Amino acid sequence: MTRRTDRALILSVAGVAAAFFALNCLTPFYGDDYSYMFTYAAGAPKLRIETLGELYLSQLNHYRVMNGRAIVHTLVQLLLMPDGKLLFNVCNTLVFAALGLAVCRAARGTLKGLRPLPLLAAYALIWLCSPGFGQSCLWLTGSVNYMWTALAALAFLLPYRSDGPGAGRVWLRAPGMFLLGVLAGWSGENACIAAAAGVVLLLARRALLGLGFRAWMWTGLAGFLAGAAALFLSPAQSLRAEHMGGLGGLGTWIGRIPSVSYHALLNLWLPLAVGAVLLALSIAGSRGQGFMSWLKRYSAAAVWFCSSLVSAYCMCAAPYFPDRAWFASVVFAAATLLAAYDALPEPRRPRRAVLRAAAAAACAVCVLTYAAAAVDINASRAAVLERGESVLAQKEEGVSDVLAAGVTGRTRWNCFTAEPDITSDPAAWQNAALALYYGVGSVNLIQ
C-alpha cells in the first residue's frame, strides 16, 4: 500500500469520525438516559449515581429486575454519571470508526491493501440502511445497547474469519479470546444470537477448508457460551418478557415471520440485493473452478448473509422489534455486500468510471441526508433546552407538577423520531424519569 493510499484512508476515517462526532454532540439525552442516571439499588431512594459503589449496587439489582445486559448497562450508567456526555461522544465516535474497519476486515479477511472506497462504502451502508440510526448510534443508551454490541459481536468473529492461525502470542490469545467471547455473548440478544450463528458457520468453514483449529478458538467459544448464559438466564430476563406480553409459542413466532420479512426487505434491500447481484456475477465468472475454490471465495459472504438474517428472524421470538434493533442485521448485511464484491473476479468488476459514478451518487445522497439530519437533530436539541429552561422556571416559582412540551424528530437519524420522549400520563416511566432529573413532583405533557 502506498503512502498516498495510507493518507487517503486516514483522511477518510477522520472525516467520517468528525461528521459523526458533530451529530453526537448535537444529540441530547433522551428517554432511558434519564432513568439510567439514577440507581436501581433495591430498597434505596432514586438518587443520581455519582460513585462506582452506587453503580455496582444499582447494576446488582438491575440484573435481577430489569434485564440481563449487565455489562452493557454498567457502561451506560458509567457514561451517564455527571460530566460523562463528552466522554461518551468521544468513545462513541471511536466505536463507529472501528465498526467501519471491522466490516471491511470481515469482508476481506484482512485490512492489508484496504482502499478508501470500500471503507467509505461500509460507513455509507450503515448510515443509509439503518432504520433507527439516531437511536442505534447517537442516543447514549441506544448506541451502547446496539452499536457497541454489534461491534463486540463482529470483533469476536473476526479471528475465526481469518484464513491463518491467528496473530499474537498463544498465551495471550487464549485468555484474550475468552474475554472477547464473554463480551460478545453478554451483549444484546439478537447480536448475541447472530454471533452464535456466525461462529458455528465460521468453524464449519475452517473445517471444510482444512485450516485446522487452535486452542484460542475453543476458549473464545467457551467465553461466548458463558456470556450468553449470563445474558439469557438472568433473573430479570423472564420478568422482562412477561412485562412485554410474553415470548409466545411456536405459532406466534411463525405468525411474526411475514412482518419481519417485510421489514427485512424494507431495511436491507440495498446491501442484500447488490450483494446478490455481485455474487451472481462472481459465480458466472468463475465456472469450472473446483468446490474448494468456490468455498474459499464465497463462504465469507454466505456467513455474513446468514448472520444478518439470523439477527433479524430471531426477533420473531420477541414481543417487540423496534427499528433500532435492526442495527446488527444492517452491519452483517454491509459485510455481505463488501464480501461479495471482494469475491468478484477482477475481469467481472465494474469499470472505474462506473465505480466513480456510483461513489459520487452515494456521496451526494450521504451529504444531503447528513444536512437534513443535522438540521433535524439541532431542532430537537433546541426544543430540549427550551423545555429545560421552562421546567426550571416553573420549579423556581414553586410549582411541583410542571408542564412540559414533548420533543419529536423527523428523520431516522434523530433519536426523537421513533417514539415520544414523554407521554400524556404523568405516571409513565418517561415522565417520572424526567421529573427525577429536574427534581420536581411530576411532569405533565402540554396538550
Image (cartoon, helix red, strand yellow):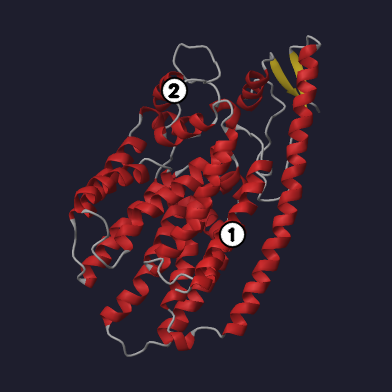
Q: Looking at the picture, does residue 421 appear above or below residue 39?
A: below
Of the residues shown, which amino acid type is indicated by label 1? Cys
Q: How many other residues sit within 10 Å of disc 2, few (<14), some (14-19) or many (≥20)?
A: few
The residue drawn where x is 36% and y is 46% is: 184
Of the residues shown, which amino acid type is indicated by label 2? Leu
Name the quadrant of the C terminus. Answer: top right
Q: Looking at the picture, does residue 44 appear above or below residue 305?
A: above
Where in the figure is residue 383, as x and y percent of width and height?
Answer: 77, 35
Residue on which the image places disc 1:
129
Where in the figure is residue 197, as x and y percent of width and height?
Answer: 34, 56
The CA distance from mark 2 to mark 1 is 37 Å
Q: Earlier in the sequence, mark 2 or mark 1?
A: 2
Q: Is residue 322 left or right of residue 427?
A: left
- Residue 63 image label: none
Task: Answer whether residue 75 is visible to the viewer in this image.
Answer: yes
Q: Looking at the picture, does residue 111 appear above or below residue 286?
A: above
The residue drawn where x is 53% and y is 65% is: 9
- Residue 52 image label: 2
Considering the numbered disc 1 on the image, is that residue within a helix, a strand or a loop? helix
Q: Is residue 440 left or right of residue 322?
A: right
The residue drawn where x is 66% and y is 39% is: 419
Considering the numbered disc 2 on the image, is that residue within a helix, a strand or a loop? helix
The residue drawn where x is 55% and y is 38% is: 88
Image quadrant in which you'd find residue 416: top right
For the residues labelled 2 and 1, say whether their Cβ atoms are less than 8 Å apart: no
Image quadrant in which you'd find residue 12: bottom right
Q: Is residue 427 left or right of residue 52?
A: right
Q: How many marks?
A: 2
Where in the figure is residue 76, as x and y percent of width and height?
Answer: 50, 33
Q: How many other residues sit within 10 Å of disc 1, few (<14), some (14-19) or many (≥20)?
A: many
